[in-house]
Structure formats: structure tokens, C-alpha cells
Amino acid sequence: MCLAVPARVVALLDDDRATVNLGGVTMPVSLALVEGVEVEDYVIVHVGYALTRLDRAEAEKTLALLAEAGVTAEAGA
């Protein structure tokens, strides 16, 4: 089973990478598969790669459901 989750981009890094935040945890991810990502965008992340950008409202809805299920600490973090 694969799990890809929405995460908010908090910083753009060199070499097609960004720092994302998910539930208060930050980590670097590759942006090699997604174009035009900016700080505050939401991206779907799987094994260290951003797969696509995601609409903010949809991302927050998904994060709220994950928080309700106990998978993440809080929605929108």
C-alpha cells in the first residue's frame, strides 16, 4: 500500500527541492516532478517526492480528515 499526503511548502531550496511541513514536521522533498511550485503551495508527497500541486481547500480538507483519523497532529500545519 502506498500513502501520499498533502504537505505545505515552507521554503524553496536549490536543486529542485523544497522544505515542506506536515503536522509540524518539516522535511526536504524533491520538486523534480512538479513545475511552478511556490512557497505556501500544497503538494502531494510520496517517499520524498512532490508528485503534484494540490488546491489549498482540498489539501486542508484532506489534512483535517487525516487529523481526525489520528494520522497527523493537526490540520493545516
Image (cartoon, rainbow, N blue to C red):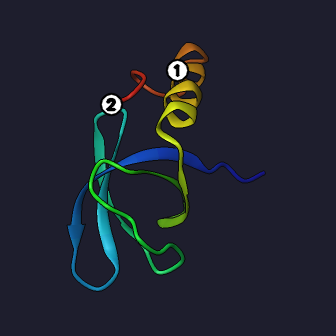
User: Badge 2 is on which residue?
Assistant: 77
Identify which residue is drawn at 47% across, 28% down.
Answer: 72
Residue in front for this viewpoint, 29 or 1 = 29
Q: Which amino acid does label 2 sit on?
A: Ala
Front residue (pair 63, 58):
58
Q: Where is residue 25 in the image (x, y as percent from the top left)?
A: 30, 41
Relative horizontal placement of residue 49, taking residue 22 as reference (left or right): right
Name which residue lies at 66% across and 48% down.
Answer: 3
Q: Is residue 24 above or below residue 66?
A: below
Label 1 is placed on what type of residue? Answer: Ala
Dot 1 crowding, Cα within 10 Å, few <14, some 14–19, many 20+: some
Quarter location, residue 75:
top left
Instruction: Name the residue: 60% across, 21% down.
Output: 65
Label 1, on which residue?
64
Relative to 21, is 66 above or below?
above
- 76 displayed left or right of 68: left
Mark 1 / mark 2, whichever is N-terminal = 1
Quadrant of the snapshot with the C terminus: top left
Residue 19 at x, y percent in the picture: 27, 59
On screen, 74 above or below 35?
Answer: above
Q: Position of residue 55 (x, y in %)?
A: 53, 43
- How many residues crowd around disc 2 within 10 Å: few (fewer than 14), some, or many (20 or more)? some
